[in-house]
Amino acid sequence: MLTIRIRDLAKSYGEKVLFDKFSLDIYTGDKIGIVGPNGAGKTTLLETIIGTIEPDRGYVETFARIGYLAQDLELPPDVLAKDYFNFPSLESDSLERYIREMKLREDVLTSRCGILSGGEKTKLKLIEVLINKPVILILDEPTNHLDIKGIEVLEEKLKSFYGTLIVVSHDRFFLDRISNKILEISRGKISIYPGNYTDYSEKKRKEMERAWEEYEEYTEEKRRLEESVRKVKEKSQSVGRIKDKKDTFWRYNKDFYGRKASKVARTGKAIERRIEKLDAKEKPFEEQHIKMGFGADDKGGDLLVYCEDIEKSFGDNLLFKESNISIKRGEKIALLGDNGSGKTTLLRILLGKEPINRGKVWISEVAKPGYLDQEIGLLNPDHTVLEEVRTSTNYDITAVRTLLGCLLFIEDDVLKRIEDLSMGEKVRVTLAKLMLGEFNLLIMDEPTNFLDIKSREVIEEALKWYRGSLLFVSHDRYFISRVASTIWEIEDKKINCYPGDYEYYTFKKDRLKDGDIKDRILLLEVQLSKVSAELDKAKDAEKEELNKKFVELTREINSLKRR
């Protein structure tokens, strides 16, 4: 069934053309992922489709009910969730089912909006959209604020959606799993590619190869013709020199050389016309690639950080306990965990900004940590990009410009002032400073936030060439799989270490089959019964510790049952 008809759509802001003469028919079953650089017009296209933005030319017709999830998560902080969201009935089976499927806590609807996490707000907004049974579902960056488990839940929900799906996202794993078409907006042009994100990437790679082949064929043919013109002109000049002679030879042969001169001139003009008629090919944009190591390469021991039996809690909220972790020289570690599990807190502990409740934290004297989140706030707004990066490095200007070029600061971009940069550009400037500085341990909290796909790809490449150690938090699984050599996960109140890449981590996690989970639940329920019996007989001094144990066991059982 046809659900959306777009004809000759055009939209500009000032002199910037977002899209022009765009037409498309969209049907039930189409699941379209929209990609493109920040500012290309992705959200504008969505809002033009739903009717909140008027196009300059053209029109959009929709033939079914639309559900729209915007990026904005601003909610009134003191209003209860059940009073803010437009649910048909708070007692309906479908609402309970959605809350269960989205793995939201049972009391989420009676919580004030101000204490909801970004992930909870996103899930509740999505439930609000889905419960009204739209045929056309339009989502703008739905994975923002979701942890990896939340994204996986969303993927399953969208894969089973029966209607038309249109999603803007920079999450490449997510796009691979939910899309069957990719719509690219770039440089004022919209292109459609069949398949998921991986298919799109492969087609783009082949397009680039073909563009280079055509450009090289064009330049070679143009060079050949220009060489022919040069030779013809030389010949014409030679004939002209004979023609200029006032001797007997010329008088007897002037008709011959006159005809020859005319023929040479005609040949030259014919070749020049062929050059003019050549289908001119622009040189494809050639990205710079990092081919040199960056970062401090100090001598010293192999171990930079070691933590033994560490525990951290805030009041009664235990984040993790009895955990042992270490960071070795050159190791690149991704820190995973649910929202609120303590990932940022652990980073702050390792930076010396947050105390632990128990255990020991040892930081080597040769460790020189740099923190991405902190450094962004220290950028000098009056500096240019080049000036700002050079304040923190001993590398020469050629190396600085090389790295900045690889981070998409091309030519005069390095002369932009810091205050005029987008947040994504500031992230890239800060990364350049950290990589070229004296740091040998980079600590990064969500480094891909604010970045479009191309920016994420160049940062992935940059970090692969970084010689130091790296610890980062991210929910971008593609980014994690490209960069990390070790995985840490905060789960069930412990920091678990997986010495391998993201694929190895998922393999190890998948080995926990349903039977293993059932056995674990049975064991925990036996322990819970034992603790419950001990609580009945316990003295007041013993009850606090037993209560904590009871809560921990209950949480782990509930967590396993939700898998």
Image (cartoon, rainbow, N blue to C red):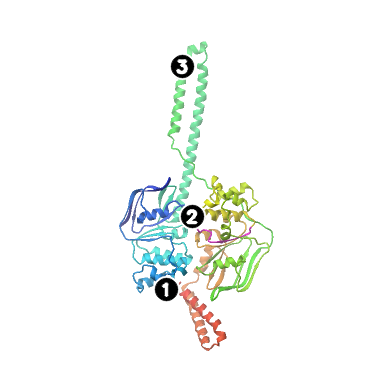
- Nearer the observer: mark 1 or 3; the answer is 1
User: Callout 3: 10 Å neighbours few (<14), some, many (20+)?
Assistant: few
Q: Which amino acid type corresponds to the residue marked 1 in the rendered image?
A: Thr
Pointer 2 or 1: first along the chain: 1
- In the rendered structure, find residue 256 and report the number of the disc placed on it: 3
* Res 52 quadrant in image: bottom left
User: Do callouts 3 and 2 mark residues in contact (Cβ within 8 Å)?
Assistant: no
Q: Which quadrant of the rendered structure holds the N terminus?
A: bottom left
Q: Which amino acid type corresponds to the residue marked 3 in the rendered image?
A: Phe
- Give the image location of residue 160, x and y in percent: 38, 64
The magenta stretch is 439-456
- Give the image location of residue 499, x and y in percent: 58, 65
Pointer 3 or 2: first along the chain: 3
Based on the picture, tell me whether residue 446 belongs to the magenta stretch: yes
Q: Name the residue under label 2.
A: 453
Q: Name the residue under label 1.
A: 110
- Residue at figure coordinates x 45%, y 33% from the top left: 275
Q: Is mark 2 on a helix, strand or loop?
A: helix
